Every structure is written in C-alpha cells, then in structure tokens.
Amino acid sequence: MIVLGIETSCDETGCGLVDGDYRVLGQSLYSQVETHARFGGVVPEVAARAHLEKIGPVVRAAMDEAGLDFAAADVIAYTRGPGLLGPLLVGSSFAQGLARTLNKPAMGLNHLEGHLASAYLTDPKLEPPFLALLVSGGHTELVHVGEGLKFTLLGQTRDDAAGEAFDKCGKILGLGYPAGPEVAQLAASGRRDFLHLPRALMDHGNLEFSFSGLKTATTREIGKLGDSIGARINDVCASLETAIVDVLVSKTLWALEACGENQLIVAGGVAANSYLRQRMTELCQREGIKLTLPDRKFCGDNGVMMAAAAQKRLQIGKWPVAGSASSGLSWE
Ligand code: KG4
Ligand code: ZN
C-alpha cells in the first residue's frame, strides 16, 4: 500500500508518500516561516491563503520525486486537527477532492498522531505499546500508546507548550520567530546554571506541565541583567533550555514508571532539540529503556509523518472513526 499524506495544520504545507515498509518514496515541504516572521507569529488568514497557493505544487513535487502517477496512491491521508481552522480546511478539502477524483479513500488524522508516527520512519519495526512524549509549538503531551493503537493521554500542559515557551521567551530576548532553533544554537555555548529559572509542578509523579511562568521569570532576569544581557545571551538561553528540558525529562521518567513501559518515543518540533535528545538518550541508557528519536528533518510539521500514521492504521486495521479520538481532535 502507498499512502499520500498531506499536512496543513499550521505554517508548513507538506506532502509525503510512504510505502508499507515506511520508506519515503517522495516528499515536499513549503515553509511559510519567512512570511510570518515579520509579524512575530503565525497569522491564520495569511497561512490559509499561502496553503491554498502552495498545496497543488507541493503535492505535485512529492509525486514527481517519487516518479509515480497519482493512481499509485492507495489512500490519501490528511491532518484533520488540531490546528488553525483555515489551513486545516485547505488540506482537508484538497485531500478529499483528490481522493474522490482518484476513487480512493481519504483518512483524516490527528496531527499529533502524525508527529508520533515520525518514529516509524526511523524504526519501521516499532510496535506499541510505548510511551510518547509529544513536544511541539502547540502541544506538550505524554501519551501512552497501547496495543491496537489505543491512545491514553497521561498528562499535558495547562498553559504554554514547550515550543511556545522557547518561542515566547526567545521573543522576550529579542530573537526572531520561531525562536526555538536560535535559542538552542545560542544555548550550546552557554552556562546552564547561569540563571535558576522555575520548574513548575515538580511534585513527584505529577504529569501535568506548566511553562507559562518562564515568560515572567525571563523578563525579570533580563531586567536585572540590564545592559549586560548582550554579553550573557548564550548563558540565558542555556539556562532557559535547561529549565524546559529538566521538566520534560523528569516527567517522562515519572510517566514511564506510571505505565511500566520500556519503550519511549519523543516527537514533535521540539524533538529536534539537541540537548533534549542528549538528555533523553542518557535517561533511557540509565533506565534500560528503548528510545526512538525521529530523524530531525521529520520532527517539524511535514506530510511524510501523516502518511506514516495512516500506514500504521492500515497495518493494524484500525480506520479512524469519524468524530472519535482516532479521527482526530483529541485522544478521547
Ligand atoms: O511540531 P512543530 O513543527 O509545529 C507544531 O505542531 O507546533 O513545532 C514547532 C515548534 C516551535 O515552537 C519551534 O520553536 C520548536 O518547535 N523547535 C525547537 C527546535 N526546533 C523547532 N525548539 C527548541 N529547539 C529546537 N532545535
Ligand atoms: Zn506539529
């Protein structure tokens, strides 16, 4: 089976073709980051228009790279939610129109199920049960994935997501949008213990996250630093990255203890972060856990991961039920 996957939930227009062995046959991605950078964040209406303009060429480019005819696609997968409504509408209309034209089924999927599925591209033999830490710009979730793809949400953020904390604190530090990759780059040569920033909800076993306090703390600390901030920006970024990663590592360990699993995947845009990858690798070596980290190029939003998620469902024989968790908007 060959799945054509489409992703348009935020500011990337993505398409990927994946076969039953999770091989990427073709892919194409158009990032709108530059369009939104001057506004300091994603403007939903602008994003929807850009998706509309790019979706056709992006899908065409993925097909061309695969050297396949549209008829070769057995299923058309797309992101049903969560995400920005206009952008989602563009992707779902395109996917359903294409499916109808080709007389093939369309499968609407949860965007986070797509992030999770980027791990199958690294390890095609990966099978549930496992624990997933999903860290993106919009979500921070610990999800248990049981046999037969039974999803159980164990914990999530009460306010800002991990990626959002990187972006918003980076903005306070005067960095561009999205700030996550730049914070990480500056942090690499910074002192991790320069500032002590808060780690919230750290009572043992608590699987809820809260990152919003980091904005106030960052503002306060740079106020104290005054003009010397320029010289200490690397140290501030390293302290911020450490505060976020410490929380993610501790809570992942508690979740592993709670569900008793010995397999972990970490996925989503923030999973591209080198320090997070290093700390999770150390945690898993120490605890005897099998860790799967998606290739960095599949951590951010892309169409390949949506195709991979659909492949897993086809293999398990679990088609999403409209209106339920599996189709989308939440895990319940
Ligand atoms: O999964 P994603 O592409 O989009 C959403 O579904 O939200 O995640 C984007 C998020 C942004 O907040 C971005 O700053 C963050 O991932 N990000 C990073 C890194 N690369 C991307 N955060 C920290 N370190 C990175 N290297
Ligand atoms: Zn995402």
Image: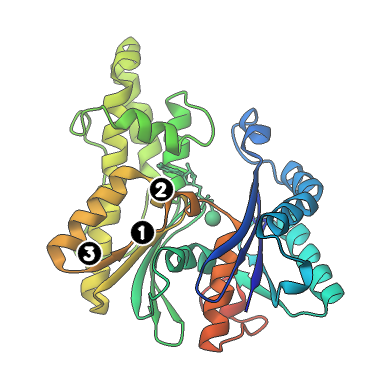
Q: In this view, does 238 lie above or below 174?
A: below
Name the residue that disc number 3 marks: 253
Left or right: 245 as drawn, with respect to 114: left
Question: Residues under labels 2 and 3: Cα distance?
Answer: 19 Å
Residue at 31 percent across and 46 percent down: it is 244
Q: Is mark 3 on a helix, strand or loop?
A: helix
Q: Ligand 1 within 8 A of label 3's CB?
A: no
Tell me which corner region of the image, top left, top right, bottom left or bottom right, holds residue 100: bottom right
Question: Residues under labels 3 and 1: Cα distance?
Answer: 16 Å
Left or right: 235 as drawn, with respect to 136: left
Name the residue that disc number 1 marks: 293
Which numbered marker is on residue 272?
2
Question: Residues under labels 1 and 2: Cα distance?
Answer: 9 Å
Which numbered marker is on residue 224?
none
Name the residue type under label 1. Answer: Leu
Q: Earlier in the sequence, mark 1 or mark 2?
A: 2
